Image (spheres, grey):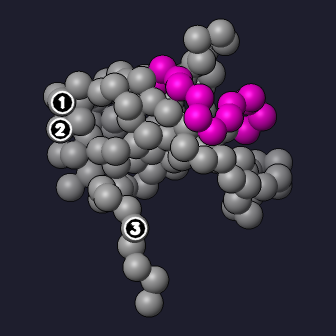
Amino acid sequence: MKRERRKFKRIDTEKVEVMWRKDDSFDNLNKMRNVSEGGFRLVIGDEQINPGEVIQVEFKLPTGEIIHSKAKVVWIKSFKAKDEQGKATLEAGIEFTDITSKDRQTIKSFVK
């Protein structure tokens, strides 16, 4: 049996779009795969982003609350799940690094 290593419970959120940017780039808009109070998994497509980079993120939960945070790219992986064009998806693990306690609590309540 595989042991769960995650610190926080997460929930699938494939309809949530995340607006994100690096300090030197224009805003990007991509779909979120899942979210927890510690971070989220982002489908990144062809955008240039690397592990260790810090990004600004903003997204609206299905409940209507808007979340703002600074976050760090922890990992990037190619997944076998196919996109609309039949290509493997490129996804990133994003960890919140500067998020208000109110926004973190909002996410925690949403994930329950």
Asked if one can make out residue 13 in the rendered structure from this viewpoint, the answer is no
Residue 20 in magenta?
A: no
What is the magenta range?
45-57
The quadrant in which residue 44 appears is top right
Q: Are marks 2 and 1 in contact (CB under 8 Å)?
A: yes
**Along the polypeptide, which appears first: circle 2 or circle 3?**
3
Residue 101 in the figure: left or right of residue 15:
left
Is disc 1 placed on a helix, strand or loop? helix
For the stretch drawn in magenta, the main secondary structure is: loop
Given the image, on which type of amino acid does mark 2 rest?
Gln
Kindly identify the amino acid type of the residue bearing the numbered disc 1. Ser
Q: Which residue is mark 3?
A: 5
Q: Which of the 4 image quadrants contains residue 51?
A: top right
Of the two numbered discs 2 and 3 in the rendering, the one whose residue sits closer to the viewer: 3
Q: Nearer the viewer, residue 110 or 62?
A: 110
Under circle 3, the secondary element is loop
Rendered position, 67 above or below 32: above
Residue identifier under label 1: 101
- For disc 2, the marked residue is 105
x, y percent for residue 98: 34, 25
